[in-house]
Amino acid sequence: MNNIQDILQWADNLIFNDTGQHLTPIQEAILTGVWQRQKYPQIAKYFNCSESHVKKEAAKLWEKLREELGEDLNKFNFRSKLEKKHSVSQVSHFGDCLLQEIDINICSQIIRNIENTQTRSHSPPDAPQSQNPSPIVDLTDAPELTNFYDRTSELSTLKEWILQARTRLITIYGLSGIGKSSIAFKLIEEIQTEFDYIIWRSLSDTPTLSALQTELKQFFARSQQNPLPALIDYLRCDRCLVILDDVQNIFKSGQLAGQYLAEYDDYSKLFKQIATSSHQSCVILLSWEKPREVATLEAENRSTRTLHLKGLAEQAEEILRDKGLTDEDKWSELITLYQGHPCWLKIIASTIQDLFNGSVSLFLAEQNEIFLGDLEHILESHLQRLSESEKKVSYWLASQAEAVDISQPGDRELSKSEFWQIIQSLARRGLVEKVQMGARSHFHINPIFKAYIQSKLNHLTEKQL
């Protein structure tokens, strides 16, 4: 045995001979993580499950391996016992077969893996790609994820765009807490062997483009003999997946959606270059709002796609079940009321537990209006980003009983063109939604934001009185 694949095969054979069952995915993750000196929290984060689940499965695993490695086997001595028993070699260079030690950074831990450099794909963008079982991965900027709720349809769409359509630039946008990071993390799990490099970087600290490009090039250059001059060259040379999170932080507040902060316009040039240049990689943007240039690139069919991530349907029942809510026959009503938004439902579920002992029926029966509670500061963070004209139109939309036909601007101070532009901007923020009524499109503001705006107006009226 000279690498983790050999170790997994050894353990699988051992357990299969004893029980007739193969290693489970969680057992493989535990063996891999422990071999690389990871702790259980890091293994849980990578496998996207709870630490307690990892501990429970690990206890079963050590029990199965103790007959071979000794009764005192545990996570701390597994590696030393296996190395001693089987004389596991770490790194070797023999003859013309060059083996390279590669750093795989997963969840802040460095995994040392052995891989033949000749298996790296340097084929042209249109050539068939062979699967790479050991991509170089850096997810240190990825948020900690505890749950993933089924989004089979959205995942299938993303995989089709990336693997079949070879889309170069994808934007996943939606309200905060809707699940953008979760679906991106799950996507990585399912397609990681299709890439040579995978890196996740957050723009929460608004890095300059120069700083970001330098960091990305350093990451991609670790297996290159000679550094390449530009980021796009690395995207051509290897099959890379780049996740850029919190993209809304490089956009201006108080302006229409997707306008860049001063000195950050060069990001727009980079995104255009990624979409229009020939290469074999994919960049995914995660954002509260859709970048303006993406709409133009999509219209030109420049290998660009956008996924507006919305709330869950019946999959949201898992959230309510985890929170221990009762009256299951009322769950669909609660889910619809709060748009199937995972974060909102978790917050409201906690309120139902605190005030109504988990009874959804009692909570719904006591409502004369949509209860917001702890959601208010989340909603306000979105409204604070709006321009003054967007705020005016939002307040007008919140005063309308039904979806409106935009042929008649709601604010006489705005021209029809300005009004349409504002509606479009609010839609790119996920605050305004379109409904089809016959041959015409009508628009309404998100019902939860409508309730919040109406609440603010009521409080303002009360103060004035």
Image: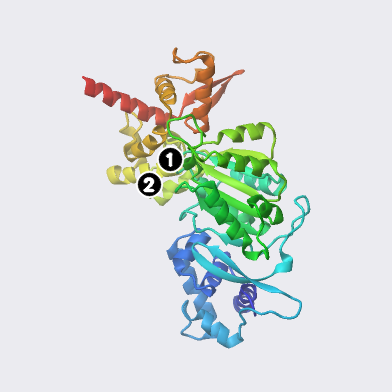
**Do the numbered discs 1 and 2 sit on residues whose CB atoms are within 8 Å?**
yes
SS of the residue under disc 2:
loop
Q: Is residue 322 above or below residue 446?
A: below
Return the residue at label 2: 325
Residue found at x 51% / y 19%: 418
- The residue furthest right is 127
Return the residue at label 1: 331
Q: Is residue 46 above or below residue 150?
A: below
Question: Residue 106, position in %: x, y?
Answer: 53, 63
Three-letter amino acid code of the residue under disc 2: Leu
Quadrant of res 68 = bottom right
Question: Residue 200, position in %: x, y?
Answer: 54, 54
Depth check: give the residue in front, 317 or 238.
Answer: 238
Three-letter amino acid code of the residue under disc 1: Trp
- The residue furthest left is 465
SS of the residue under disc 1:
helix
Quadrant of res 448 = top left
